């Protein structure tokens, strides 16, 4: 005699395999982490001057801020006008095509801004720009 098992079809094979879904989610997460561009801010807030001919830069850049008092900041720390040359040359060792952007406050004396631009050029920067508002 044979014995037959009585059961409903919902009990047999109703399990969903979530492994492929988890794999796809992790691959998307890794993709977005790798393609994200991290911008290192200067560490201080400055009021940029306005310019009609301003353009957006699409590359990673070395950001240097000059406050209204003439203090120079980079990466959240004060480096002073004398430290610009050393910091820029050290950062250009990784990629010598990286542009330097000076974010000078609108009330910064021109002499302080020119000193920072000159130090960046002497450090080997090919492109030094001023950050402005449109």
Image (cartoon, rainbow, N blue to C red):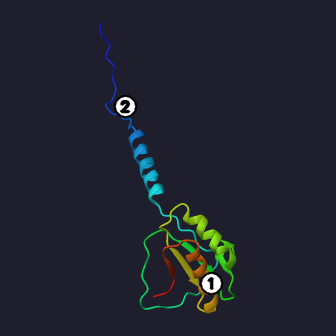
State the residue at coordinates (46%, 52%): 29
Query: Is residue 108 shown to the viewer in this render?
Result: no
Task: Count residues near mark 1 (Cα–Cα under 10 Å), then give few for <14, some for 14-19, many for 20+.
Answer: some
Q: Position of residue 63 (x, y in %)?
A: 56, 74
Which one is in front, 132 or 110? 110
Give the answer, above or below, for where 121 lies relative to 25. below
Question: Which quarter of the rendering shows the C terminus?
Answer: bottom left
Farthest residue, direction top: 1
Q: Position of residue 113 (x, y in %)?
A: 60, 86
State the residue at coordinates (53%, 90%): 49
Q: Identify the residue position indicated by label 2 in the image.
A: 11
- Give residue 123's quadrant in the image: bottom right
How many numbered badges does the structure rendering display? 2
Q: Position of residue 44 (x, y in %)?
A: 64, 78
Distance Cα–Cα, label 1 vs label 2: 78 Å
Pointers 1 and 2 in contact (CB under 8 A)? Answer: no
State the residue at coordinates (61%, 74%): 42
- Give residue 47's quadrant in the image: bottom right
Label 1 sits on a secondary structure element that is helix
Q: Position of residue 31 (x, y in %)?
A: 43, 53
Question: Which quarter of the rendering shows the N terminus?
Answer: top left
Q: Identify the residue position indicated by label 1 in the image.
A: 115
Query: Is residue 86 shown to the viewer in this render?
Result: yes
Reading the chain from its start, which is encountered first: label 1 or label 2?
Answer: 2
On screen, residue 83 versus residue 57, left or right, reads right
């Amino acid at each position: 005699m044979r014995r037959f098992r009585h059961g409903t079809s919902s009990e047999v094979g109703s399990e969903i395999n979530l492994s492929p879904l988890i794999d796809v989610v992790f691959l998307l997460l890794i993709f977005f982490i790798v393609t994200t561009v991290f911008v290192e801010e200067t560490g201080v807030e400055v009021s940029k001057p306005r310019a009609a001919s301003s353009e957006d830069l699409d590359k990673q850049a070395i950001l240097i801020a000059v406050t209204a008092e003439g203090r120079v900041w980079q990466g959240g720390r004060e480096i002073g006008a004398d430290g610009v040359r050393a910091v820029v040359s050290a950062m250009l060792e990784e990629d010598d095509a990286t542009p330097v952007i000076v974010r000078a406050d609108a009330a910064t004396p021109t002499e302080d801004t020119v000193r920072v631009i000159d130090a960046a050029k002497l450090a080997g920067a090919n492109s030094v720009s001023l950050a402005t508002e449109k």
